[in-house]
Amino acid sequence: MINNAYLILKSKTHGTIKSNSTQRGREGYIALVEVNHELISPRDMVTGRASGRRQHKFISITKEIDNTTPVFNQLLVQNIEIEEANLLFFGPSQVMGIGFAAGAERLLYSIKLKNAFIAKIGITLHNLQKPQENQPVFVENISLVYQKIEWVWAQGNISAIDEWGGAV
């Protein structure tokens, strides 16, 4: 079970982009509220055989509006390349069968993007008259495209990689 997710981002012009997070061991990490991503393999409905190239859809993250918001907007409007984006997913250590103290979290899963660009940014102000418990009020959704992606399950270092031919 994933309890927390974070983003570490490095661009050619800004270096490592840091939030004002002060959580011990994760200082500067950008806290994520939600992550969405889809891969599609087009299939013939009759035979089930592949009928086209795989398609990587945007990887979209949702985060609270914070000090990194203007930087993300600048990356989009100036079409600045993101050299590397690491999405880190943490959960209870017992998920991995490791005997750490109760409440301890460990990295369970990560997604690494190389040569990425921001394709879309949207902001949402949730209903202020009817706030929902544990829901951030003011968030932004950022969609990224990328040239290379790597998925890693931390226990046993199980991974998969895909890379698109040519520029993003």
Image: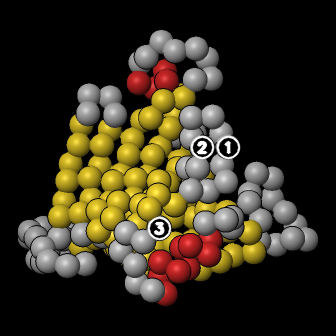
Residue 135 relative to residue 156: left or right: right
Task: Single out the residue that lies furthest toward the right.
Answer: 129
- The residue labelled by disc 2 is 27
Within the image, what quadrant is residue 148 found in?
bottom left
Residue 10 versus residue 21 in the image, above or below: below
User: Quick one: label 1, few (<14), some, or many (20+) residues within 10 Å?
Assistant: few
From the viewer's perspective, is the residue at label 3 or at label 2 nearer? 3
Q: Amino acid at mark 1?
A: Thr
- The residue labelled by disc 1 is 22
Counting residues from the N terminus, which is met first, the one under dot 3 or under dot 2? 3
For the point 35% across and 60% down, the residue is: 84
- The residue labelled by disc 3 is 14
Name the mark on residue 59: none
For the point 23% across and 43% down, the residue is: 159
Residue 92 versus residue 39 in the image, above or below: above
Residues at marks 1 and 2 touching, judged by CB atoms closer than 8 Å: yes
Q: CA distance from mark 1 to mark 3?
A: 20 Å
